[in-house]
Structure formats: structure tokens, C-alpha cells
Image: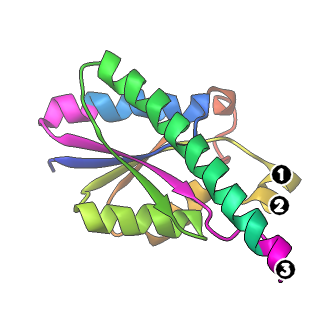
């Protein structure tokens, strides 16, 4: 199997950058391309009225700025390793859906993701976007484990 079009979701975390290292290795091995994606939750608020609309505009501006910073950081990392990626900011209320839609749009044949290793109540409350992508992806997904997961094979 050859992976020519690899998608790397990033969120600005150090763990996501570890996945970038693996993605670059694969891009080089298969002579493929790399697309970075950062998904911005486009509807984080609940409520109605003028205050809501004003807060939404401010939120989206800040969220897009944060996404740009995360993409800049990831792009610097992969360029330092010898690969020039494409990049996308996607607005989608459900993060894993934004990742999967982007994979479909660009014709990705592999998604490389990190796992933050949340466990217990933190995992229950925050969820696992990686787990959701794994459960719904139609292409292979490579999960790069966080260093803190070395001793726990059950965490995703």
C-alpha cells in the first residue's frame, strides 16, 4: 500500500507535532504530499440575542488566529524536516467531522493523528477526537501515541 496524500490534523499541541514527524517520514518514504488541517469549532456558544452574535464574531476571529498559529507551528516543523505542506483551516462544529470531510475533499489516503492520552473523567468529559476519527474514517489512520502513554496500552 502506498500513501501519496497524507492528512495531518493539528491543534498546536506538542503531541500533534510528534505526529508531524511521523507524517513527514511517510511523505518522504512514499513521495507523497502532506496537508495540515486545523478545525475551528464554528458554534461554541449557546444562547440568543445581540450579545450572542457579537460574541460569535469575536470568538471566530480569535479561533481562526489560534488555528493559524497552530498551522504556522506545524508548518515550521515539517519544513525543517524537508517537506512543504498544504494547509487548511476548516470551520466545523464537530471537530472529527471537519477532519473526515477534509480527508475526503483532498483525497487523502492516510490520516496521521496524535493521541493526547486522556483517561478517566477527563476522557469522558473531553472525548477523543482521535477515537471518533478512527471509528468513522474510510481510509487508514495512523495514531501517534503521546509519550505519557508508554505504559498504558489502553489509552487513546
Q: Quadrant of residue 67?
A: top right
Residue lying at the far right of the rendered structure? 121
Within-10-Å neighbours for mark 2: few <14, some 14–19, many 20+: few
Q: Which residue is mark 1?
A: 122
Residue 94 against residue 26 in the figure, above or below: below
Residue 45 against residue 149 in the figure, above or below: below
Q: Which residue is mark 2?
A: 125
**The residue stretch that appears in magenta:** 26-52
Q: Residue at x 30, y 68 (%)?
A: 104
Q: Nearer the viewer, mark 3 or mark 2?
A: 3
Name the element at disc 1: helix
Which of 89 and 144 lies nearest the eye of the viewer?
89
Tell me: 74 left or right of 119.
left
Precedes in sequence: disc 3 or disc 2: 3
The answer to whether marks 3 and 2 mark residues whose Cβ atoms lie closer than 8 Å is no
Name the element at disc 2: helix
| Distance in Å between CA atoms under marks 1 and 2 | 5 Å
Precedes in sequence: disc 1 or disc 3: 3
The answer to whether marks 1 and 2 mark residues whose Cβ atoms lie closer than 8 Å is yes
Which of 129 and 10 lies nearest the eye of the viewer?
10
Tell me: 33 left or right of 112.
left
Judge whether residue 46 is colored magenta: yes
| Distance in Å between CA atoms under marks 1 and 3 | 26 Å
Q: Quadrant of residue 86?
A: top left
Within-10-Å neighbours for mark 3: few <14, some 14–19, many 20+: few
Name the element at disc 3: loop
Q: Which residue is mark 3?
A: 47
Amino acid at each position: 500500500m502506498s500513501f501519496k496524500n497524507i492528512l495531518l490534523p493539528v491543534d498546536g499541541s506538542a503531541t500533534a507535532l510528534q505526529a508531524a514527524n511521523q507524517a513527514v517520514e511517510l511523505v518522504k518514504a512514499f513521495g507523497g504530499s502532506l496537508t495540515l488541517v486545523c478545525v475551528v469549532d464554528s458554534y461554541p456558544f449557546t444562547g440568543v440575542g445581540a450579545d450572542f452574535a457579537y460574541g460569535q464574531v469575536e470568538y471566530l476571529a480569535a479561533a481562526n488566529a489560534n488555528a493559524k498559529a497552530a498551522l504556522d507551528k506545524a508548518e515550521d516543523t515539517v519544513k525543517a524536516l524537508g517537506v512543504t505542506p498544504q494547509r487548511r483551516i476548516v470551520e466545523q462544529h464537530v471537530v472529527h467531522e471537519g477532519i473526515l470531510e477534509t480527508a475526503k475533499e483532498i483525497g487523502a489516503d492516510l490520516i496521521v493523528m496524535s493521541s493526547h492520552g486522556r483517561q478517566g473523567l477527563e476522557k469522558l468529559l473531553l472525548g477523543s477526537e482521535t477515537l471518533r476519527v478512527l471509528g468513522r474514517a474510510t481510509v487508514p489512520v495512523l495514531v501517534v501515541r503521546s509519550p505519557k502513554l508508554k505504559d498504558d496500552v489502553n489509552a487513546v
